Image: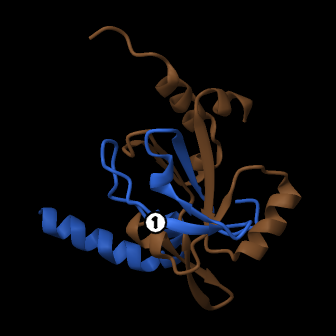
Amino acid sequence: MAKLEASDTVVLGISIDSPAANAAFAKQIGVTFPLLSDMNKEVLTSYQILKPYDVKGGKYQWAQRTTIVVDKEGKIQHVEQGDSAVNPNSAVSICTGLHKPKGPG
Amino acid sequence: MKRIVWLLLLILAGHFPVAAQEDAVAKTNLKVGDVAPDFSLLSDKWEQVKLSDFRGKKNVILAFYVLAFTGG
């Protein structure tokens, strides 16, 4: 996290959980960044990452595990989906790279 | 010929519906260089957090997870 703060980066966790569930989750795992509630699935829909899950015969639509890096201009710099998106290292290294001063030209 | 191969694949896929479902990734069409769709959501502290509030100030890592408390 220190590496990220140094690179002018914030992390936002997003799921369909309620703010109350996210507050308890944040406390349990000790995260300091915001966990956001997409209870209407609006963001998951606009980012096209709603995934169907079957749980004991019930059908649900929750998030596909995804990491997206957005730069200061609001543009997407990196998209990672699936199990590899659990590991934040590549997203972190990209943000560290974004912070580096650009060379001439 | 191509059609027959596709047909065979479709038939085969029908035989393994469970495996196909588990492997399916809800693939986003968003790609590098696109403007990230803006949003405003309630945080765990019941505050509205808006993506565009960070514009010009911070890079943002959006970490979408399946459900709280599930290790995902």
Residue A38: image location, x then y, percent: 57, 73
Q: Quadrant of residue A70?
A: top left
Residue A48: image location, x then y, percent: 40, 66
Name of the residue lying farthest toward the top: A104
**Chain ID at mark 1:** A
Asked whether the viewer can see residue B69, the reply is no
10 Å neighbourhood of mark 1: few (<14), some, or many (≥20)?
many
The residue shown at (65%, 26%) is: A6
Name of the residue lying farthest toward the bottom: A57
Residue A42: image location, x then y, percent: 46, 75
Asked whether the viewer can see residue B71, the reply is yes
Is A103 on the left-hand or right-hand side of A4?
Answer: left
Chain given the colour blue: B
The residue shown at (86%, 59%) is: A27
Amino acid type for the residue under numbered disc 1: Ile
Q: Nearer the viewer, residue A33 or B16?
A: A33
Chain given the colour brown: A
The residue shown at (61%, 43%) is: A10
Quadrant of the frame with the C terminus of chain A: top left
User: Against B49, is A10 above or below?
Assistant: above
Residue B49: image location, x then y, percent: 58, 61
Q: Quadrant of residue A16?
A: bottom right
Is A80 on the left-hand or right-hand side of B11?
Answer: right
Secondary element at tag 1: loop
Is A71 on the left-hand or right-hand side of A32?
Answer: left
Name of the residue lying farthest toward the left: B1
Which residue in the structure is indicated by mark 1?
A49
Q: Nearer the viewer, residue B9 or B58?
A: B58
Quadrant of the frame with the N terminus of chain A: top right
